[in-house]
Amino acid sequence: MDVAAHVNYMAHLDAKKRLTIRGAKYSYYQVKEYDNGCILLEPRELIKPKRISAKTLKMMDDSIKNFHQRKVSAPIDLSEF
């Protein structure tokens, strides 16, 4: 892995135990803290979750169809909650 720039500076925790990364290029980092005191920060980018599968959509459609045809289970008594 080639690293274009090398940055070296002293950092410290603030009163709320936070550490500031100067000039951070990412908003999110995966943090790995090792027993020997080393801390590894790996940049992460949040992405949209996977779409709902076709199988799940079909099951939802079938459930609504059954509901409209009154193919439903007996009512559940939730009064004790």
Image (cartoon, rainbow, N blue to C red):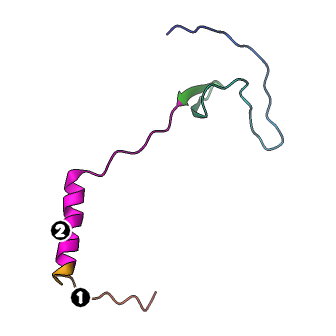
Q: Foreground residue, 50 or 8?
A: 50
Question: Helix, strand, or loop for circle 2?
Answer: helix
Is 62 left or right of 35, judged from the image as shown? left
For label 2, the crowd category at 10 Å Cα-Cα, with few meaning under 14, some 14 to 19 and many 20 or more, is: few
Q: Is residue 77 within the magenta segment?
A: no
Q: Between marks 1 and 2, how big is the CA–CA gap?
A: 18 Å
Q: Which residue is mark 2?
A: 62
For label 1, the crowd category at 10 Å Cα-Cα, with few meaning under 14, some 14 to 19 and many 20 or more, is: few
Q: Position of residue 34 (x, y in %)?
A: 59, 28
Who's the residue at 75% across and 38% down the image? Answer: 18
Res 62 quadrant in image:
bottom left
Res 48 quadrant in image:
top left
**What count of labels does the image hold?**
2
Q: Which residue is mark 1?
A: 74
Is 24 left or right of 78, judged from the image as shown? right
Q: Position of residue 42 (x, y in %)?
A: 55, 27
Q: Could you tell me the amino acid type at mark 2?
A: Asp
Question: Helix, strand, or loop for circle 1?
Answer: loop
Q: Position of residue 16 (x, y in %)?
A: 79, 44
Farthest residue toward the right? Answer: 15
Q: Is residue 61 within the magenta segment?
A: yes
Q: Foreground residue, 19 or 38?
A: 19
Who's the residue at 84% across and 42% down the image? Answer: 15
Tell me: residue 37, above or below residue 47. Answer: above
Who's the residue at 21% across and 71% down the image? Answer: 63
Q: Could you tell me the amino acid type at mark 1?
A: Ala
Tell me: residue 54, above or below residue 37. Answer: below
- Find residue 19 and name its label: none
Residue stretch rendered in magenta on the structure: 44-67
Q: Position of residue 14 (x, y in %)?
A: 82, 37
Q: Closer to us: mark 1 or mark 2?
A: 2
